[in-house]
Image (tube, rainbow, N blue to C red):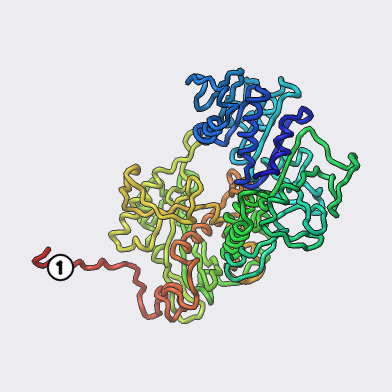
Amino acid sequence: QVPYMREPLNCLARRIYEAVIVVGPARSGKTKAMVEGWINYTVTQAPGDMLLIYSTKTKATDMSKVDLERSFSATAGIAKLRTGRKADDNITSKKFKNGMILKLDSATETSLSASTYRYAGATDYDRADDAVGQEGSKFELMLMRVQNAKSSGMVMAESSPGRIVRNPKRVEDLSPHESQPCGGIADLYNQGDRRRFYWLCQDCNSYFRPDFETLKWEQHAEPLEAAKTAWVECPRCCHRHTESQKQTMNLEGRWFRDGAIDQYGEVVTDESAIRTSKWATFWFEGIVAAYASWENLVYRFLNADALFQDCGDEESLKTFINVRMGRPYVMQSRGQEVGAHQLMARAADHERGIVPLGGRFLMMSIDVQGGKQNPRFVVQAHVYGEGLQRWVIDRFEILTNPYRNNDRINPMVYAEDWDLLIEQVIKKTYPLADGSGRVMKPVLTLCDSGGSGEKKKGKQKSSSVTDHAYQFYNRLKGHGLSHLFRLVKGASRDIDDLVKETYPDKRSKLANGEIPLLMLHTNRLKNRVAASFSRLEFGARFFHLPGWADRVWFDELTVEYIDELGHWQKPDGARNESFDLCAYAEAGMHYKGGDDIHWDNPPAWAADWQFNSNVVDADQTPKFERVARRRYNHSKGIFG
């Protein structure tokens, strides 16, 4: 079923190599071969103590209970070597009659120190950090564990790529088989002899590499219909290969080291031109994978690419490239590379505090800063127009409370300071640019529920800010304004939804399931914002950067960077309020249904000004409070 895994398996038993690394897409059979296949060989043919490293202890437990247990029971050679004693066969350690011990664990300082093994392997290498605490690279630690075994020792790592290419090289600067530089499994691959899998063209009889670019399909409005036409095209003779030929080409396929095959598909015999290494490293892409159909690959790609083109969300595209294609992902939006000076040069000359022509609805966002250093509310006003083009029309801070002798506010200490948000933010209006005297009301105000409080023993203390935020929302209910205000919080781990509405329960002293809290996929939201301000040409989701803003505002917008895992990171001590507030506004827009607006028939709050429910005429007073509906007691009749 997976003939491309034969050579990697054979290399595991060759003494001329000290390590074997396999990079490939998920669900391609590489884990079955490199873990269960390797264990089968070592237990029955070349016993020696083995350490298997999984991404987490939970994953190690699951693999031990399910995959390995089934494999051992179904394999006669292993079954007869099991001792049958409970002490010799538990979740994390298995001992066989020939004396071999198999240990399963995650990468910790304890598991990778002070022990000696003959074999050490890591599966799903990129699903965990490359480093182990303060000890350094986990792969180097694995090499140290087998050092006593000398040439009979072996280290293995396999994974689909999971790191981001932050500084991509030009294709001309890479060798034919070299991966773009990034951490994780791709970095290990680059250090070895760099073998790629090649197919033999059924027409011109020359070898070609089945990369994703060789997969072609007919253009169609429906992704599923386009996916059904998928074929692989030989880059030399343009011969079409159908999926029914995939297994034949896999059986005839060959692995070539870097330099062992030229650009014309001819085999090179000059060993001096071929890369050599003590690490045998292999890389193949999703087209080769036995369990991945070409139709499904094309369908998933078209959907992920459409999502990115529509809203700048790269998460689906990143997952496809890394996991299904088996290639390190290069960020499409280069937002983290755009400097503040570049954005200032592109800033538009629209007036501050005025809803520009084309603006359809207004979002307010609030960042809460607690603690003793510089407590304040940071507020930003965002206007969205047709096609979700956007403007930032105002930015201000609330610093003092006039009802407390103009003392400095502190959202972490004084509950009454939160009431300033009602008049200064939630009920704030902005005049329209047509000079008619009409004003626009905000559709929604989003506020950080945690804020940055004082640090206590190295940890952020924000519980007081959260309690005051919940109290404030409850007070808004009494004013009939709670429908215009939502608290937000960044999710502690990745969630499936971009924005998910939750209701904190009794674990909070002041929330009993009645306060809506928006959980944000912060990373995806910031990707969207970065894609919008990185766009050079006018179009959907174009960011009209504010010409009235100073350099500090642009610095805050561009201060964060993307790490090798694809997560936005803020340098210590840096300010990023502009970026956070834009992300909150993006969340509010999505929560209100902005991504699904049909602009030929928009909702009333996103309509043209003359029909917009949030536009108030000059001779009228804006109304914000929602009047409670009167309840009627109806008779149920004689039948109840």
Question: Does residue 464 sit above or below 17 in this rendering?
Answer: below
Classify residue 81 as left or right of residue 199. left
Q: Please, which residue is most extreme toward the left here?
A: 638
Front-most of 463 and 105?
105
Front-most of 575 and 62?
62
Residue 368 in view of the camera: yes
The percent coordinates of residue 629 (x first, y second) are 24, 67
Q: Secondary structure at mark 1?
A: loop
User: Looking at the figure, which quarter contains the N terminus?
Assistant: top right
Residue name at image x 76 percent, y 46 percent: 196
Residue name at image x 78 percent, y 55 percent: 201
Residue holding disc 1 = 634
Front-most of 261 and 446?
261
Residue 255 sits in quarter:
top right
Which amino acid is tagged 1? His
Q: Please, which residue is most extreme toward the front here?
A: 76
Residue name at image x 48 percent, y 40 percent: 460
Front-most of 497 and 484?
497
The percent coordinates of residue 56 (x first, y second) are 54, 35
User: Looking at the figure, which quarter contains the C terminus?
Assistant: bottom left
The percent coordinates of residue 503 (x first, y second) are 36, 51
Residue 279 sits in quarter:
top right
The percent coordinates of residue 371 (x first, y second) are 46, 44
Residue 109 in view of the camera: no
Question: Does residue 456 sit above or below 482 in this rendering?
Answer: above
Classify residue 179 as left or right of residue 54. right
